[in-house]
Image: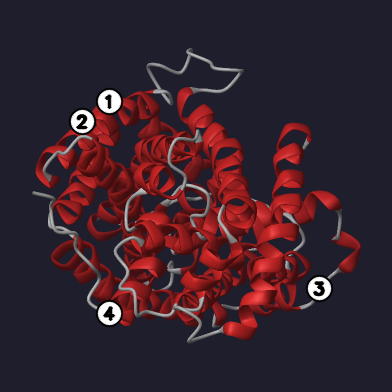
Amino acid sequence: MARKRENFSGKVAFVMALAGSAIGLGNIWRFPYMVGEHGGAAFILVYIFCSIFLSLPLLFTESIIGRRAAQATYGAMETLSPGTSWKWVGLLSGVTCFIILSYYSVVGGWSIDYLFRAAVSGFDYGSVESSSSVFASMSSSIPEPLAFFTAFLAATSIIVLLGIKKGIEKFSKITIPVLFVLIVLLAVYSLTLPGASEGVRYLVTPDFSKLSPSMFAYAMGQSFYSMSLGVGCVLTYSSYMKKEENIATTGILTSIFDTLFALIAAFAVMPAVFAANLEPGAGPSLIFETLPYIFAKMGADSPFVGRSVMIIFFLSVLMAALTSSISMMEVCVSNLMERKKMSRKAATALTFAGAFILGSLCSLSFGSLGEIKLFGLNIFSFCDTFASNYLMTFGALAFSIFVGWKMGRADVRDEFTNGGTVNVRLFNVVYFLIKWISPLVILAIFVSNFIL
């Protein structure tokens, strides 16, 4: 007898879960430093354009596939295109999620570490260099990063183990509103700092001389990364979506929440960076090296306020990381449950064990395994680059081609419009973008990853 498939309880629950999948380290960590590295307001405008006209249609493609098939990635592609090789695209999505979950949990562990540091002793750094040396020492050690990485992965597993309604849905409905409140509080604090106005000006005054093909490529890539596209998270969550729900409405709301959170995160970070007279292009080290120094400096006159801000920030990082990690683990678990007929408990345990092994290698690559290089990169950086720049992009390209060219237009229209009852006029625009624009743009991104 087939196992009864769970569903999200309604639109709010589904949107919160999908927003949680989208809102992660890509927003609170990656987006601010990408803005800093690529021209501030000009990059933001390009990013918003890409989110509306490229990422949103791609989100629709995964939603259409997932709800139509009511299965995770492998089973969905096999069901909608039986006897073809499309099922391997679904398998590849599961593998991509597994790789990202493994190294992503290492960063999640760092966020727990820094949350404890903020709560127990705070940060007392005299310079960015001293802050960087502390991070380098922490990340290159063995027991501390492994312990916190394991704790993060275990927390993710517990939420997934509880299932769709009791685990993912309940966690997302609580976490997302709290996360928005925390990031708004951080933005308000950052905007009140002396010298913050320069950071605001940087974020709202576009310098169009910064526009370049590489900026467009980075903005498109960031938009895909931020919304967790191309890895099957949206597809898998949509497979738990009720048939009467509106794909267009839920997709648009998810896109709005994701973009809004990223913008607020930028306003929480960049004004503080300018207030501390630091360069905005701090890069990937921003949240673990630059910001602890900034918070310590700004809180020198009021240690309680400074420590409170640090606690709020790293709690936000941790919560954002968890909402995304559970969606990636759910892709792996759901595929194992469907294809290998495993129980949720067994599938979660197996995913945890595999991610623990690969994640441990990623963690140790900053220290004892640092000499091991793959194409000149340590294990962590190789997994990140390979999954984010190539596997995710290929997955997004494959899903757009599948919906635009493999599925029948009538089937796509039927799913998107709920049998022709909603969003009929919008469908023609969305279908044109999916069929013609998305594949060409994603292909351009895919090629640019090899040359930029």
Q: Nearer the viewer, mark 2 or mark 3?
A: 2
Residue at the spot x=19%, y=33% of the render?
350
Determine which residue is flagged by label 2: 353
Q: Amino acid at mark 4?
A: Gly
Residue at the spot x=62%, y=55% of the render?
222
Determine which residue is flagged by label 4: 10
Contact, mark 2 vs mark 4 (Cβ under 8 Å): no
Determine which residue is flagged by label 1: 357
**Disc on the earlier residue, 2 or 4:** 4
Contact, mark 4 vs mark 1 (Cβ under 8 Å): no
**x and y percent of residue 216 in the render?**
77, 56
Contact, mark 1 vs mark 2 (Cβ under 8 Å): yes
Q: Which of the 4 image quadrants contains residue 318? A: bottom left
Q: Which of the 4 image quadrants contains residue 168? A: bottom left
Residue at the spot x=36%, y=35% of the render?
138
Q: Amino acid at mark 2?
A: Ala
Q: Amino acid at mark 1?
A: Ile
Contact, mark 2 vs mark 3 (Cβ under 8 Å): no
